[in-house]
Structures are given as structure tokens and as C-alpha cells.
Image (tube, coloured by chain):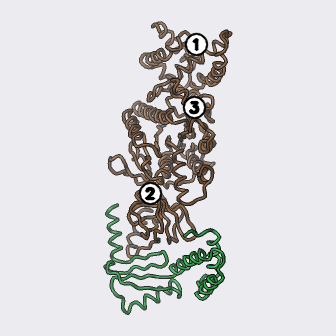
Amino acid sequence: MKINREARNAAKKLFLLCRPAGRLDETRVRDVVKSLATARPRNYIAILSRLRKLVALEVQRHSAVVETASPLGAAEAELRSSLQKQFGPALNLQVAVNPELLGGLRVRVGSDVWDGSIRGRLHALEKSFQA
Amino acid sequence: MSNLLAEIESQIKGLKTEVSRSNVGTVREIMDGVAKIEGLTDVAYNEMVEFSNGSIGLALNLEDTEVGAIVLGEFAGIKEGDPVKTTGRLLQVPVGKALLGRVVDPLGNPLDGKGPIKSDTHYPVERVAPGIIKRKSVSQPVQTGIMAIDAMIPIGRGQRELIIGDRATGKTTVAIDTIINQAKLNRAAELSGEKDFRPLYSIYVVIGQKRANLARVLGVLEEQGALPYTIVVAATASDSATAQYIAPFSGAAIGEWFMENGMDALIVFDDLSKHAAAYRQISLILKRPSGREAYPGDVFYLHSRLLERSARLNESSGNGSLTALPIIETQSGDVSAYIPTNVISITDGQIFLETDLFYQGVRPAINVGISVSRVGSAAQIKAMKQVAGKVKLELAQFRELAAFAQFASDLDAATKAKLDRGARIVEVFKQQQYHPVSVELQAAVMWSVQNGQFDDVPVDKIKIVQDKLMEYLTTRKESLLAGIRTKKAIDDALLAELKSALADFKQMGH
């Protein structure tokens, strides 16, 4: 779907309104979506889909995905608290088990990845031999 | 000093093997070598990014929610959803003398099957041109070995001289002749052990040419022994538009290494019209706004920043230079088209080649009227200034009179003399391709023409007599030529010697 510049700018403005003090306010987002759907201004579908995209990116920016080789068990709480200390309490944390990592863990917050897995180190080793 | 830094860096690396941090993104769209990537919040403009199939991309558009990157190399294997990583490095190429004699792609990977290139120095592809303080005006000549150019449109070290003309008028030949002559001069100086000779290394950048043409050029360079002094950077017609876009900048980076290390280099961009077309393609796919003829708004800046990088540095900056010979192809002689006028205004002069002259047998088909060198005689040795100062004027007068003389049968003696002299100069400037003439020989021949030594030779025999004279001078009068070469001027003693040599030559019955 082609989203024109007008709709893009409107969506951006609405998105900024939903994010007072740099934090996404969920109730505001819901209100905005509801009023858009009822008032139906010009390009409302385009505005809504662009807004959805901006919100999705914002959510992703504040979510962390932790991959581990084996289930963490009791250590999970500790990991959660240390990550929240680093990135703020609003962090949306998911933990997944990925046996392919062989050992260690990989943390992704927004578009930053910290790779402390054995798989990652093997990759680095492989690359150093190729060079 | 750099060793120390490298040691510290390797120590740090050794300590940091525990966890690696990287900035990643996801491919959202991929089309004709341009990828739109989501994520990559830390990417810098012109930074290299790495795709999961090992291809390298270059981040060119940093937008609100996306990053537009061009893929250098293979993009067929990249799919939507693939991860992309930043590398923290700007695009760079290996530089140094190890590249001489090699054919490389725009990223510096060898294409000639002669094994890997051993070079530990890398230069970023996009660099800022040398500043004002570091520069010096052009004063040393680049001997092209082409008489018409060395006599009338002299090129200096650090100059940007455009070679412009229609298809098949000999643009590449002019450039290749120049490269061959540099190799010849370099080799001669190496053999004679001349101390203050400054070798001129050549870089030939191929942009969007046919591979068959490149193979032919390589064959010529090899055959003439010019390849050991030449680096070829090739992005042919079948390479991606992104490779064609990067190629001249890589070539310039390779040339800058010579310049900044106190050496002289010559770079040929063959050709910038195709470069502009490749850049237009990339810009259109990146959805940048298009302007005249659908070229993007920064197509002028594209070429101006490239050509600004060739310069002559002053003694305190190493005294190196980078001379540029960009080539532009025109459509049916139209020099007022968009890209040709841009590049004409950027460069320090142009050599205009014409189809009509080419088919009249005037080869190289240089139109003397609109070809200029804005550096002028500052880039000539004294001997050449002495003999060639008036040639351009004489030829211009000849062209004017020749048009006029078609209608008049009765001409006064002065007019007739001018016509005769002009016709002879035109003949003398005809030259076979890949046969550069040394500057001392050029000066001797030019002196002979200027002083009426050819006036009794019929115009259609000029070329034969000239060849004989050149052979006679090179085989019998080596000391005279060596005198001109070392003194760089024709003084009284040399003049007497030259006169007696010409008298002897005439006696032999020519």
C-alpha cells in the first residue's frame, strides 16, 4: 500500500503525541486509534497503517529477546533484573531456548545484539581463519 | 607508530573475545542491488554493512524508519527478512605499489588470476580532496607522446583534462597512448638510472565498458610493456550499477596513495557518462528525487568531488600529484548536453575529438579550435614552448583561410604561405595509435616545420619524410636529442647542431 507524504506526516505527529516524555503511552495509542476509526479523516487507513508501523518499531526498540542454549531456571530472575537496570523498567523481555547456540546466551535489545554464545564464538573463529 | 597502535589493538581484541556486540537490522525490500533495511539504528552514512550471504552493502540513505543500502557484488541471494550487520568501517580499498600490474574490481579484489594482493594499507573510497594550503599550481608536464596534444594542449601533473567526443573517435586511444608513453619514459629512466626523474604511474578505471574492449586494452598494455606501471580498476557493463558507481572513487583512492606519498600518478576515468548513468539508476531505485534528464540533483557534486581529488601538492606536503583524464562520450557532437557541460566546467580544459576529422584521416581527430588546456604553457618544457608557441594560432588562421580559399583562386603570397604551412602542420600532427613520440623528437620536428624545412615537400609526402627524419634523428643524432632532453631547451649550440643535422638529412636526398 502506498502511503503518501501527508499521511506519513500525520502519522508521525500522532505518534509523537502518543509518546509524552519519550515513553509510549498505551492508553493514548488506543484513544488515537479509536478516534481515527470513528472520525475517518482523509487517508485514515494509510495513517493507521503507518502509525502501526511506528508503534511496532517503538515496541521493538524497547523489547529484549534473550536466547539461551538451555532453560535458565532460577537465573532468569537475576538476568531480568540486571537487564532492567541497564535498559530501564519498561523493558519487554522474552526468553527463548535455542539449542543451536550450544552454550552461553545471546541478548537482543532493539537493534543491538550482544552475542556471548559458543556458536557466535565459533563463527568468529571460523572468520579469523578465512581472513 | 602505527605498529604500536596495531599491537595495542590486537591486545584489546584478545581480551574482548568473550561477548561481541553488533548492531543488526532486517532486510525489508531488495530490488536491483538496493536494499531497504529496518533496524540498524547505529549505522553511519557510507558505512559498510554485511548481509547474511557475505555480500557487502553501503548505507546511502538514512531515513526515518529505514536505511537504504546499495549492495556491492552478489545480491541475488539476499531475501526479505535476512539479517544485516553493521561493520563499523567505511568502504575502503587496498592501496600501494603491490597493485601495479594488476586488474582489480572496485573493492580491490583481484580479477586477473595472479593471486592475492599483498597490501596492508587501506584508503577509504570517499575522501575529502586536499585543502588549499597543501596545493600548488601545476608546473610539471605530463608527456602524452601525442604531438598535437603536447604542442598545443599541454597537460600538467595535477591537471584535470577532459577527453570528449562521439563514439569511436579515439578517446580511449588518446588515454591509452598516454599510459603507454608514461611506461616508456619510466622504463627508460629506470634503465639509465636518472636520479631526478619522477615516474608517473597510471590507473585506468573502466566504468561500464564492454568486457571485450577491456580485454583488448589489456592486450595492448601488455604488448607495449605498460602493464607493470598500470593499475586497472574494472567495473564492466555486466557488473552491477553499484560497482560502476564506486569504481572511479576507488581508483581515485588508489591514486591518492601515490600522491600523498610524494609520487605522481595519472588516472583515466573511462567513461564518466556511463558513471552518471549508473548513479542515476541507483538514485532512482533509492527513490531520490530526480531532476533534469532524470539525473539526481547531486550529479554535479558526484563528479566535482571526484575530480577535485586530483591535485598537485606542494613540497611541504610531499610534492606528489594526481592527474585526471576523465572521458565523456557525446551524442552526435553535442557538447552542450547535461553531463558534458557539467564535466567541462569542472575540468581544467578539454580535448575535443571529432568524427568528421576522424574520417578525413586526421588522427588523432583533435579539433584544435575548441580544445583547450587552462594550464597552458606552464606545463611545457622550454624547448616545446620555443617551437610550439605559435602553432595553435597558425592552425586557427589556416582553418579560417582554408574555408575562404575554396572560393578564391588568386591568393596573395602571404595567404598562400599560411595555407601551405597550415596544411603541413596538420600532416605533421597525424600520428598512428600506440606510437608515442618523445618530447625531444617532437621539438626537433616542430622546429623543422616552423623554420620551413618541410616547405619544399609535397603535402601528401610529408608523413613519409617526417618518419624518415625521425628515424634519422633517433639513429644518427642521438647526442642532439639527448641534449634537448637534458637541457629541456634549444640553446644556440643545440640549434647549430640541429641545423647541421637537417642540412645533412636534406643532402641525403629527401
Q: Are marks 1 and 2 in contact (CB under 8 Å)?
A: no
Disc 3 marks a residue whose amino acid type is: Pro
Which residue is found at the position 55% from the left and 26% from the top? B357
Please name the residue shown 54% across and 40% down the image: B328
- The alpha-carbon separation of the residues under discs 3 and 1 comes to 24 Å
Q: Residue A44: give x, y in percent of width and height.
A: 62, 77
Q: Which residue is mark 3?
A: B154
The quarter holding residue A102 reads bottom left
| Neighbourhood count class around disc 2 (C-alpha, 10 Å): few under 14, some 14–19, many 20 upward | many
Marks 1 and 2, the one that precedes in the sequence: 2
Disc number for residue B72: 2
User: Dot 1, how many residues are within 10 Å of its Cα: few (below 14), some (14-19), or many (20+)?
Assistant: few
- Which amino acid type is marked by label 1? Gly
**In the image, is residue B78 above or below residue B445?**
below
Q: CA distance from mark 2 to mark 3?
A: 38 Å
**Can residue B1 be seen in this snapshot?**
no
Snapshot quadrant of residue B433? top left
Which residue is painted at 60% across and 51% down in the image? B301
Decide which of tag 3 and tag 1 comes sooner along the chain: 3
Chain letter behind tag 1: B
Q: Is residue B501 left or right of residue A115?
A: right
Judge depth for marks 1 and 2 and give the one in front.
2
Read off the residue under disc 1.
B452
Tell me, what hue is chain A? Answer: green
| Secondary-structure class at tag 3 | loop
Rendered brown, the chain in question is B
Corner quadrant of residue B313: top right
Residue B267 in picture, x, y percent from top left: 50, 42
Identify the residue at horizontal 61%, vertical 68% (top origin): A4
How far across and how far down the image is residue B375, in percent?
A: 62, 35
Q: CA distance from mark 1 to mark 2?
A: 59 Å
